[in-house]
Image: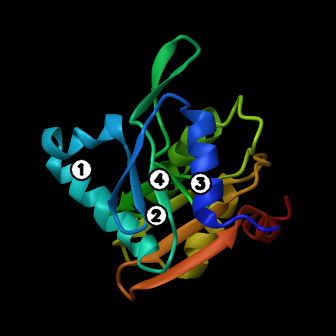
Amino acid sequence: MKKEPWDSSFELAKALFPDEEFVLTEPNIWVAKSRIEQREKEPEKWEREMSQVHILTDRGSIAYFLPDKFIHNGKWSLCADLILDGEVVEMKTITGGRSTMGGKFKYGYRQGAILLKHCEITKKHSVFIRLFSEIPIKSIKAKIAGELKNRFDEGRFICFYEKTKELYIWTYDELRSIIGT
């Protein structure tokens, strides 16, 4: 029997953060209780993240925002933003050019990989980018394909092109095939 997205998302969230409580704040959006204080402390960040996640949840996805930080190798590390439909996702907003997008993708990819390093359930992690720049789609795909060279994790690159309001989703394998890795 196939699990519903909220089942797999909740299971992964609890596996990664067993002591965390998740609170339903809006339809399809659950937030770690420890992260809710961000609403008051960093309202601009909260609004940006909510506007990003609505692009996905308004299309039927289920999101679980994770705690901001977690302990990795004995020190605090920034955590990937959320679990979306059963997979870890880091969200980024890009207003710069192609190289900025590549750098933000690489950083987001690393955040997901670090979080899942010791996870037994999955190693699949993705990056969502809300793109305000006018970079051609072919160039976006080529840049991300290059960033995936010699990286073999499963996942997806999700790109919302603000200019056209279009959502593009490519698996990492699809993008790797562009450059033959």
Q: How crowded is mark 2: few (under 14 residues within 10 Å), some or many (20 or more)?
A: many
Q: Which residue is the site of mark 3?
A: 9
Q: How crowded is mark 1: few (under 14 residues within 10 Å), some or many (20 or more)?
A: few
Image position, residue 147 (x, y; %): 65, 53
Image position, residue 144 (x, y; %): 62, 61
What's the CA distance linking mark 1 and mark 3?
Answer: 23 Å
Q: Is residue 98 visible?
A: no
What's the CA distance linking mark 1 and mark 4?
Answer: 16 Å
Which residue is pictured at 71% across the width and 28% down the height? 118
- Give residue 67's quadrant in the image: top left
Question: Which badge, 1 or 3, is on the more N-terminal residue?
Answer: 3
Question: Which badge, 4 or 2, is on the more N-terminal residue?
Answer: 4
Question: Which badge, 3 or 2, is on the more N-terminal residue?
Answer: 3
User: Mark 4 falls on what kind of element?
Assistant: strand
Q: Are marks 3 and 4 in contact (CB under 8 Å)?
A: yes
- Residue 169, relative to residue 24: is it above or below? below
Q: Which residue is the site of mark 2?
A: 129
Q: Which residue is the site of mark 1?
A: 45
Residue type marked 2: Ile
- Residue 85, relative to residue 87: is it above or below? below
Q: Do the residues labelled 1 and 3 touch (CB within 8 Å)?
A: no
Q: How is the image coloured?
A: rainbow
User: Mark 1 falls on what kind of element?
Assistant: helix
- Give residue 5's quadrant in the image: bottom right
Residue type marked 3: Ser
Query: For this rendering, which residue is in front, 178 or 75?
Result: 75
Q: Judge left or right: residue 65 versus residue 73.
A: left
Which numbered disc covers residue 64?
Answer: 4
**Figure quadrant of the C terminus:** bottom right
